[in-house]
C-alpha cells in the first residue's frame, strides 16, 4: 500500500511540475478551421496568454490544457478581404460572422482566414460549401476517426495525454470511407467535426486529419470544457450547423458513448434532413434498440458499401479503397 501511495504522490508531483513549469511569455491564437456559405462565414477560436510548449507529447498536451486564457484581447479576424475586430471573452474565446461586400459572395472552395492579436497570429482554412453540395457530413472524432478507447478510462488518458497527431492511430479504413463520400468527385460534401476533444487540441486534431489523409476542408467544432459542457454539448452545435446549412446531412459516430442517442434526437428534430446515420461499433453495442434505422459497422468497408448502395459514395472509389469488398460493391444494385 505504501508503494502505491508513494507512486501516486510521485505521479501527482510530476503532473504538477509539468503544468506549472515556466512557459514562453508570448501569447498564442487558436483559430478553428471552419465551414462557410457564399453569403457568410463564422470564425471562432481562443486566445492564450502563454504559448504552450514541451519536449514530449505529455508536456505539450498538459500545457495546452492548462494554458491561461487571455481575457479582453482585441482580435482582428479577416477572410477574403473582409475584416472585423472582436474582444476575447472571459474564457479567451472569440467568434465573429463575416459577410462579403454587398453584391458579392465568397467563392466555393478552400481559402484561408487569419486572426491576429498583439504578439501573435494564426491562420486556418475555411471551406466555403457550395449550395449545390450534395450533403453535409457531421462526424465525431474519438473512436470514430481516431482510436481513443473512451470506454477504457486508463487507455483514454494514455491516448489523450501521451499521444499526439503523429502517434495517435486512425480507425482503419475511415480515411478511405470519408474520401469516397459524394456521388460526384467534382462536387464533394462538406465535413464538420463535432467532438468532445478540448478546444485546446485544435492544432492537434487538424494535423491528425491531414496526416492520415482525411478529406481537406473539415470544420472543427471542439468542446469548450466547463461545468455546462459535461453533457448535451453536441446537440446545440449540430443544431446550429443544420440551421446554417440547408443541405441534407449524414451523421457518423460510434457506439462507445451517446452518439446514437444524440443522432436519433437530431433526426427527430429535423425530419427529412438526415440521409443516413453510421455508427462504428466501439463497444456498448449489445442493445440493438440504440441503433434503430442506423448502420452499425465494425469495418469501414461495411459503411462504405451501404453508402454506395444509398447513392452517397462513388462506387469506383469504394472499390479502389476497399479491394477486399470489391465483389460486394460490384454486385450492389
Image (spheres, rainbow, N blue to C red):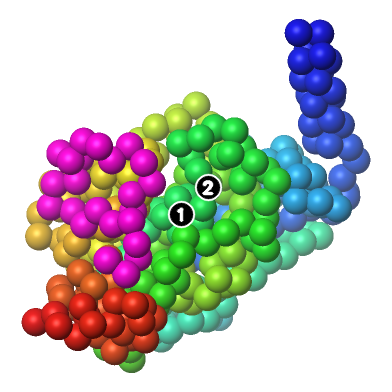
- Does residue 210 show up magenta in the picture? no
Percent x, y for residue 174?
Answer: 42, 67
Q: Nearer the viewer, residue 5 or 133?
A: 5
Q: Tell me, for residue 84, which label it has, or none.
A: none
- The residue under label 1 is 141
- Does residue 289 show up magenta in the picture? yes
Q: Nearer the viewer, residue 148 or 327?
A: 327
Q: Measuring 30% from the left and 62% from the top, which residue is drawn there?
A: 244
- From the image, state whether disc 2 or disc 1 is nearer to you: 2
Q: Is residue 35 visible?
A: no
Considering the image in quadrants, where does the C terminus appear? bottom left
- In this rendering, the answer to whether 267 lies above or below 122 is above
Q: Residue furthest top?
A: 1
Q: Measuring 55% from the left and 71% from the top, which residue is drawn there?
A: 212
- The residue under label 2 is 148
Q: Rounded to the nearest whole Å, what is the CA distance between mark 2 and mark 1?
A: 9 Å
Q: Residues within 10 Å of mark 2 (few under 14, many from 20)?
A: many
Q: Which residues are magenta?
A: 280-302
Amino acid at each position: 500500500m505504501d508503494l502505491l501511495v508513494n507512486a501516486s504522490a510521485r505521479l501527482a508531483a510530476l503532473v504538477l511540475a509539468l503544468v506549472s513549469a515556466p512557459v514562453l511569455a508570448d501569447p498564442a491564437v487558436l483559430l478553428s478551421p471552419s465551414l462557410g456559405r457564399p453569403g457568410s462565414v463564422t470564425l471562432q477560436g481562443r486566445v492564450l496568454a502563454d504559448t504552450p510548449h514541451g519536449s514530449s507529447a505529455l508536456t505539450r498536451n498538459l500545457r495546452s490544457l492548462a494554458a491561461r486564457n487571455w481575457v479582453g484581447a482585441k482580435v482582428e479576424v479577416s477572410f477574403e478581404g473582409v475584416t472585423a475586430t472582436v474582444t476575447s471573452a472571459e474564457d479567451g474565446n472569440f467568434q465573429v460572422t463575416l459577410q462579403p461586400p454587398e453584391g458579392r459572395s465568397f467563392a466555393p472552395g478552400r481559402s484561408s482566414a487569419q486572426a491576429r492579436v498583439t504578439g501573435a497570429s494564426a491562420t486556418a482554412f475555411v471551406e466555403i460549401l457550395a449550395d449545390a453540395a450534395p450533403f453535409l457530413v457531421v462526424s465525431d472524432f474519438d473512436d470514430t476517426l481516431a482510436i481513443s478507447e473512451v470506454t477504457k478510462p486508463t487507455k483514454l488518458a494514455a491516448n489523450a495525454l501521451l499521444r499526439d497527431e503523429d502517434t495517435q492511430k486512425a480507425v482503419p479504413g475511415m480515411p478511405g470511407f470519408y474520401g469516397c463520400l459524394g456521388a460526384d468527385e467534382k462536387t464533394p460534401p462538406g465535413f464538420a467535426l463535432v467532438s468532445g476533444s478540448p478546444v485546446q487540441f485544435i492544432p492537434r486534431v487538424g494535423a491528425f486529419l491531414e496526416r492520415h489523409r482525411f478529406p481537406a476542408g473539415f470544420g472543427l467544432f471542439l468542446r469548450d470544457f466547463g461545468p455546462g459542457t459535461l453533457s448535451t454539448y453536441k446537440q446545440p452545435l449540430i443544431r446550429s450547423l443544420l440551421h446554417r446549412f440547408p443541405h441534407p446531412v449524414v451523421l457518423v459516430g460510434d457506439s462507445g458513448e451517446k452518439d446514437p442517442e444524440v443522432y436519433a434526437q437530431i433526426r427527430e428534430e429535423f425530419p427529412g434532413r438526415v440521409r443516413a446515420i453510421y455508427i462504428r461499433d466501439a463497444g456498448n453495442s449489445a442493445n440493438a434498440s440504440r441503433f434503430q434505422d442506423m448502420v452499425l459497422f465494425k469495418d469501414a468497408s461495411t459503411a462504405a458499401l451501404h453508402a454506395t448502395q444509398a447513392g452517397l459514395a462513388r462506387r469506383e472509389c469504394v472499390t479502389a479503397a476497399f479491394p477486399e469488398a470489391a465483389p460486394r460493391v460490384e454486385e450492389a444494385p
